[in-house]
């Protein structure tokens, strides 16, 4: 079961000399305190573009209306996790990774369908990815699964939904590492790979031991969770090679 939270804005109206508060409730689909300094959230996009533009500066030229809505929702989520997050200071690197000069906060954003996700930390590098669970992912699995990962997944083929969930999780895990790294030029089959048994925890989180290898090998622990209709994966910490 996922946790649902709500963010409230307020409208006030005078009625017979009294001030009445109206709550405009907007769903924060999921929020997770990863540790004392790291926050993660998923926003279900139910608002129109004008709602987000009241609070999010649109610096990026995004021509497609729906992509622009996803872009705005992802950035809107950042100050919901840390109220003092300076949205106006975000810049975008040549690799398309958004960042804050001076790195007051490390952050990562992802979006798919009607959802946007973000993870923020003032201390550690982070990466997050969300993906809709769909069999269409099988069409590109040859681009990100190495032979050992394919062998692992074959063990789950008799359980069709679990097999699809795990395939999506591996893709999302590698996407989260790619965003954590932030410098592009990644081979999803060679530079990051599953390295040990997956742990299915009683709290519904899944631990995936990975190795990131671009000259220097870095052990990483990816955390993943299956929602309906999507999968979430994130990584926190680790050192750059």
Image (spheres, helix red, strand yellow):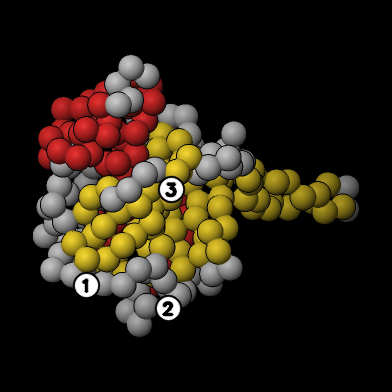
Q: Quadrant of the C terminus?
A: bottom left
The x and y percentages for residue 88 are 39, 70
| Residue shown at the point (22%, 33%) measured from the top left | 151
- Find the distance from the CA under tag 1 to the CA under tag 3: 22 Å
**How many numbered marks does the figure carry?**
3
Q: Which mark is residue 207?
A: 3
Q: Which mark is residue 241?
A: 1
- Find the distance from the CA under tag 2 to the CA under tag 3: 28 Å
| Residue shown at the point (49%, 55%) measured from the top left | 40
Q: Earlier in the sequence, mark 1 or mark 3?
A: 3
The quadrant where residue 135 appears: top left
CB-based contact (under 8 Å), mark 2 and mark 1: no
The x and y percentages for residue 166 are 34, 33
Residue furthest bottom in the image: 102
Q: Earlier in the sequence, mark 2 or mark 1?
A: 2
SS class of the residue under badge 1? loop
Q: Is residue 33 left or right of residue 90?
A: right
Q: Nearer the viewer, residue 68 or 40?
A: 40
CB-based contact (under 8 Å), mark 1 and mark 3: no
| Residue shown at the point (30%, 41%) measured from the top left | 170
Q: Is residue 82 visible?
A: no
- Find the distance from the CA under tag 2 to the CA under tag 1: 22 Å
Q: Nearer the viewer, residue 235 or 26?
A: 235
Q: Quadrant of the N terminus?
A: top right
SS class of the residue under badge 3? strand
The x and y percentages for residue 100 are 35, 74
Label 2 CA crowd tier, 10 Å (few <14, some 14–19, many 20+): few
Q: Nearer the viewer, residue 45 or 226?
A: 226
Is 98 drawn above or below residue 154 in the view shown?
below
Label 3 CA crowd tier, 10 Å (few <14, some 14–19, many 20+): some
The x and y percentages for residue 194 are 27, 48
Q: Which residue is mark 2?
A: 104
């Amino acid at each position: 079961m996922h946790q649902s939270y709500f963010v409230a804005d307020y409208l006030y109206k005078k009625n017979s000399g009294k001030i009445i508060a109206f709550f405009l409730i907007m769903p924060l689909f999921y929020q997770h305190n990863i540790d004392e300094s790291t926050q993660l959230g998923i926003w279900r996009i139910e608002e129109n573009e004008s709602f987000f533009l009241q609070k999010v500066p649109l610096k990026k030229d995004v021509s497609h209306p729906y992509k622009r809505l996803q872009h705005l929702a992802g950035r809107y989520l950042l100050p919901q996790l840390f109220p003092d997050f300076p949205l106006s200071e975000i810049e975008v690197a040549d690799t398309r990774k958004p960042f804050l000069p001076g790195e007051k906060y490390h952050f990562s954003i992802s979006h798919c369908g009607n959802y946007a996700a973000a993870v923020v930390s003032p201390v550690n590098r982070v990466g997050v990815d969300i993906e809709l669970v769909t069999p269409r992912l099988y069409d590109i699995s040859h681009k990100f699964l190495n032979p050992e990962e394919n062998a692992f997944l074959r063990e789950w083929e008799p359980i069709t939904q679990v097999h699809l969930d795990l395939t999506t999780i591996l893709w999302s895990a590698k996407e989260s590492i790619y965003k954590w790294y932030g410098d592009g030029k990644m081979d999803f089959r060679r530079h990051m790979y599953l390295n040990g048994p997956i742990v299915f925890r009683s709290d519904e989180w899944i631990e995936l031991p990975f190795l990131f290898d671009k000259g220097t090998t870095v052990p990483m622990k990816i955390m993943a969770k299956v929602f309906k209709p999507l999968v979430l994966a994130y990584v926190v910490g680790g050192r750059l090679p």
